[in-house]
């Protein structure tokens, strides 16, 4: 079951999405920024972060008052993003790792929302930027230990893995060998750029395919899922769409969708992304009308 055939199956829904998108085109980049906190919360929740949406809103509001209101974050290079002095936060339970994971993702997502909105129509972040964001997602979290104590030698944050890898959500999946990873990542970005410029695949369908493709490479010792969702976020906003915040999403359901997509059956992932995009556009459109 290919992505092109799914594009044909859902051409009616895609047409409805694009009709609404065209009506709201000038406002979509700004509307996308209003979904940063929810998108970041969804992404870390998929990784089993226990913080609630209320915690996320509180962290986002603090980052806005202490950082985003004072810095043009879109003007900051990705390599400098992780060097920003972020406000220190603590969770009620005292687990700084989960707070830092959320905080890092919010800052990265805000950077994506701002920088992507300034580069509409382009193919997306490059490999160097992706690696910098990968490093940022790990900084100050328990995952740093995975990089520091990786078999085969420590890996710098944002560096590619040096050993084979397995994941609990899909234990039978075979990922590229470590020696193949740099070439696989390079092929991924060349493929994405080629697909983007050919315009044969609808941007929302391509965003789904990109996510599954990247997860299949699994280039990092940890943080691959978060980075895959950042790539999706970045591409959707650059193409004039909203980041998809899937309502009532259960972690196991998302992992199943990604596993199925990696195994050649992306239908559930595609229909979930498309239906969510349509719901979001409808919601914002009717709010605008009222």
Image (cartoon, helix red, strand yellow):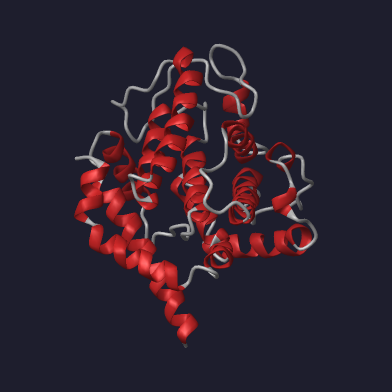
Quadrant containing the N terminus in the rendered view: top left
Where does residue 257 sit, x and y in percent of width and height? 30, 45
Query: Residue 243, relative to residue 135: is it above or below?
Result: below
- Pick the residue in front: 121 or 149: 121
Q: Residue at x 33, y 58 (%)?
A: 274
Query: Going by the image, does 266 lie left or right of 136?
Result: left
User: Can residue 44 be seen by looking at this rendering?
Assistant: no
Q: Eyeballing the image, is 57 above or below 285?
A: above
Q: What residue do we see at 39% from left, 24% from top?
A: 166
Left or right: 125 with respect to 284? right
Give residue 245's quadrant in the image.
bottom left
Tally the numbered discs.
0
x and y percentages locating residue 196 in the rendered image: 43, 42
How far across and how far down the image is residue 162, in percent?
Answer: 52, 15
Residue drawn at 27 percent across, 63 percent down: 13
Q: Position of residue 82 (x, y in %)?
A: 71, 40
């Amino acid at each position: 079951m290919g992505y092109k055939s799914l594009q044909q199956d859902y051409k009616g829904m895609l047409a409805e999405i694009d009709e609404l998108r065209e009506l709201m085109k000038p406002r979509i980049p700004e509307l996308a920024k209003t979904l940063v906190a929810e998108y970041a919360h969804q992404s870390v929740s998929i990784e089993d972060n226990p913080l609630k949406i209320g915690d996320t809103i509180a962290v986002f509001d603090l980052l806005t008052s202490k950082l985003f209101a004072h810095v043009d974050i879109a003007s900051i290079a990705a390599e400098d993003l992780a060097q920003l002095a972020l406000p220190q936060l603590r969770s009620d339970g005292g687990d700084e790792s989960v707070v830092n994971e959320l905080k890092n993702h919010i800052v990265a997502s805000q950077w994506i929302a701002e920088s992507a909105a300034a580069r509409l129509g382009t193919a997306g972040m490059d490999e160097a930027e992706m690696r910098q964001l990968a490093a940022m997602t790990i900084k100050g979290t328990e995952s740093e230990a995975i990089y520091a104590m990786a078999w085969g030698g420590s890996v710098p944050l944002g560096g590619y893995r040096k050993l084979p890898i397995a994941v609990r959500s899909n234990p039978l999946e075979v990922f590229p060998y470590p020696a193949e990873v740099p070439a696989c990542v390079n092929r991924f970005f060349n493929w994405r750029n080629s697909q983007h410029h050919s315009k044969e695949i609808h941007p929302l369908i391509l965003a789904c395919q990109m996510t599954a493709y990247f997860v299949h490479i699994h280039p990092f010792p940890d943080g691959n899922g978060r980075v895959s969702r950042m790539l999706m976020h970045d591409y959707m906003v650059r193409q004039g769409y909203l980041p998809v915040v899937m309502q009532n999403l259960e972690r196991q359901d998302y992992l199943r969708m990604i596993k199925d997509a990696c195994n050649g059956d992306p239908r559930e992932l595609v229909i979930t992304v498309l239906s969510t995009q349509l719901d979001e556009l409808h919601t914002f459109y009717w709010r605008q009308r009222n």
